[in-house]
Image: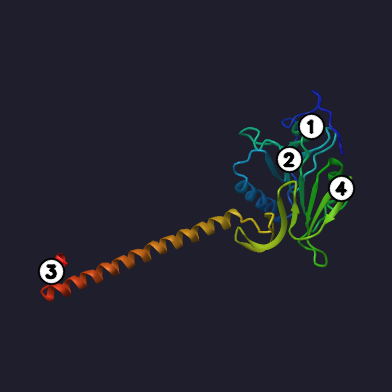
Amino acid sequence: MLEYKPSDCLPTAEELPDSDDTPVDNELQDLIPSLLKAVLALLWENRWDWFFGVDMGIYYHPEESAIVPDGFLSLEVQRFIDEDLRLSYVLWEEQVVPMLVLEVVSHKRRGEYSRKKKLYGEMGVLYYVVYNPRRRRKAPLEVYKLVDGEYQLQFGNPVWLSEIGLGIGAARGIYQGINREWLYWYDEQGQRILTPEEQIANQRQLAQRERQRVTEAEQLAQRERQRAKLLEERLRSLGVDPDSL
């Protein structure tokens, strides 16, 4: 694991570049981690001890350029620094190594299975997640856990991440109107945690069913009133005062 010795001479996040102007290779490298972040923002809305970065530089050494994973999760850190938010993630300032790093492989590999994997292990990243949607003979999702300094492939889909309290897995679904395989968070029972879009849709369905229930109740009450009125008119036609009954 890399060691950091804070010093007054180390650059701060404000002094370090927050972008190298290199675009992501495709939309998935933005959408997949953004989906995971959106779910966490709703699931952990009352927690302030976590941060999920998307396409953000991690500075791990003052003399090296930042490494930029597609997504990463850190726990036991401030969710927000200030209103300007984080410019980058600087390890000697944060003093917390990301718990999980995500790389989405595009048609052009960027060292996900070699250089980056080795560096994340040296940093001490506990979970290294690689998603390669173009894989056909092997599973597109690989989750590695750092054990005694080496990454070991974890089996299953989803894979339970006990230190995080969530599982991660791949499944087909709809996000931003796109029907395809996405990465999702799971609970300990293996149930997929719904996305904000899905939760909104569920709430709309519940509201619609409630409106339908109220409408049906009102219609039933109206029919009962009509039957009561017809009965009253029938009694009066027979010379019976219904009010006297």
Query: What amino acid is found at the position of numbered circle 1 in the picture?
Result: Trp
The label number, if any, that marks residue 241 in the structure image: 3
Residue 27 vertical position relative to residue 10 in the rendered view, above or below: below
Residue 57 pos. (x, y %): 75, 41
Query: What secondary structure is found at the residue carrying circle 4?
Result: strand
Q: Residue furthest front?
A: 245
Quadrant of the frame with the N terminus: top right
Mark 2 element type: loop
Q: Measure the C-alpha gap from mark 1 to mark 4.
A: 24 Å
Residue assigned mark 1: 92
The residue pinned by badge 4 equals 147
Crowding at dot 4, Cα within 10 Å, few <14 / some 14-19 / many 20+, comes out as few
Lower position in the chain sequence, tag 1 or tag 3: 1
Q: Is 25 placed above or below 20 here? A: below
Mark in front: 4 vs 3: 3
Task: Tell which of 191 and 231 is nearer to you.
Answer: 231
Viewer-proximal residue, 85 or 17?
85
208 displayed left or right of 24: left
Q: Earlier in the sequence, mark 2 or mark 3?
A: 2
Q: Nearer the viewer, residue 240 or 69?
A: 240
Dot 2 or dot 1: first in sequence order is: 2
Query: Which one is earlier in the sequence, the residue at label 4 or at label 3?
Result: 4
Name the disc covering residue 19, or none.
2
At x 61% / y 55%, what residue is drawn?
Answer: 195
The residues tagged by marks 2 and 1 sit, at their Cα atoms, a distance apart of 19 Å
Q: How far, Cα to Cα, is label 2 from label 3?
A: 87 Å
Q: Is residue 162 left or right of residue 210?
A: right
Question: Which image quarter: residue 6?
Answer: top right
- Residue sitting at 78 percent across and 35 percent down? 91
Given this view, does label 2 or label 4 mark the residue nearer the observer? 4
Q: Residue 7: x, y in percent?
A: 81, 25
